[in-house]
């Protein structure tokens, strides 16, 4: 039971992450290229409109932290140039035998590593604990709820033929709300990179 505001009330909280969002043509291209993977029995596909690249998962935090986080991320982004990102191929984490996440890959890009490092530093400056895990750039296209891996997974991965270039010109602070049918995402703030027009 929740008391009156200011007395026994639970502070509003958000489930946050920092991401690169893609234009519709890229999201639709990813979905088409991975249709066979996303349709396998036991796979929960990520909705097409939510396909993105996570730079930093922040997790549950007080809603009052959203504005300071957005300011810190915007300041970090403004110091870095726009760049192109190459998406290609598909794979799984952690392995084919114990697959839990199906992804589209990202070619090594020093600009992406620099952006991730700046975002991580900004998030920590805003009062969030450092991320202990290494950054593994990828676009999640589906999740496997439980082992064993779906039949045909390896063949479906081998058949993926996907390659495209994305112009990266902003970083987004995102809010994720967990619902029975999956997460629903909403942008909290858009943070342009250097040289991006207002």
Image (cartoon, rainbow, N blue to C red):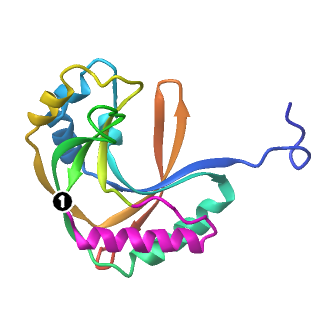
Q: Residue at x 57, y 70 (%)?
A: 124
Q: Nearer the viewer, residue 4 or 47?
A: 47
Q: Is residue 139 visible?
A: yes
Where disc 1 sits, the SS reads loop
Q: Quadrant of the N terminus?
A: top right
Q: Residues within 10 Å of mark 1 (few under 14, many from 20)?
A: some
From what the image shows, is residue 107 above or below residue 146? below
Q: Percent from the top left, x then y, of residue 26?
A: 19, 47
The image quadrant of residue 135 is bottom left
Residue indicated by mark 1: 107
Seen in the image, is 48 located left or right of residue 12? left
Q: Percent from the top left, x then y, of residue 35?
A: 18, 29
Q: Nearer the viewer, residue 73 or 87?
A: 87
Q: Percent from the top left, x then y, of residue 16?
A: 54, 52
Which residues fall within the magenta stretch? 108-134
Q: Is residue 192 visible?
A: no
């Amino acid at each position: 039971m929740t008391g009156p505001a200011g007395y026994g009330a639970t502070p509003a909280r958000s489930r946050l992450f920092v991401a690169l969002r893609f234009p519709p043509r890229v999201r639709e291209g990813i979905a088409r290229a991975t249709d066979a993977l996303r349709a396998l029995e036991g796979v929960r596909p990520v909705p097409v409109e939510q396909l993105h690249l996570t730079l930093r998962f922040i997790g549950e935090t007080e809603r009052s932290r959203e504005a300071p986080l957005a300011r810190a991320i915007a300041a970090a982004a403004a110091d870095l140039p726009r760049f192109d990102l190459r998406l290609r191929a598909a794979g799984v984490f952690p392995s084919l035998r114990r697959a839990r996440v199906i992804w589209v890959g990202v070619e090594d890009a020093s600009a992406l590593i620099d952006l991730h490092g700046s975002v991580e530093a900004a998030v920590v400056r805003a009062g969030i604990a450092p991320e202990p895990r290494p950054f593994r750039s990828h676009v999640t296209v589906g999740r496997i709820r439980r082992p064993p891996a779906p039949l045909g997974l390896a063949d479906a991965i081998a058949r993926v033929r996907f390659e495209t270039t994305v112009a990266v010109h902003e970083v987004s602070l995102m809010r994720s709300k967990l619902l029975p049918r999956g997460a629903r995402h909403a942008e909290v703030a858009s943070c342009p990179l250097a040289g991006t027009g207002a």
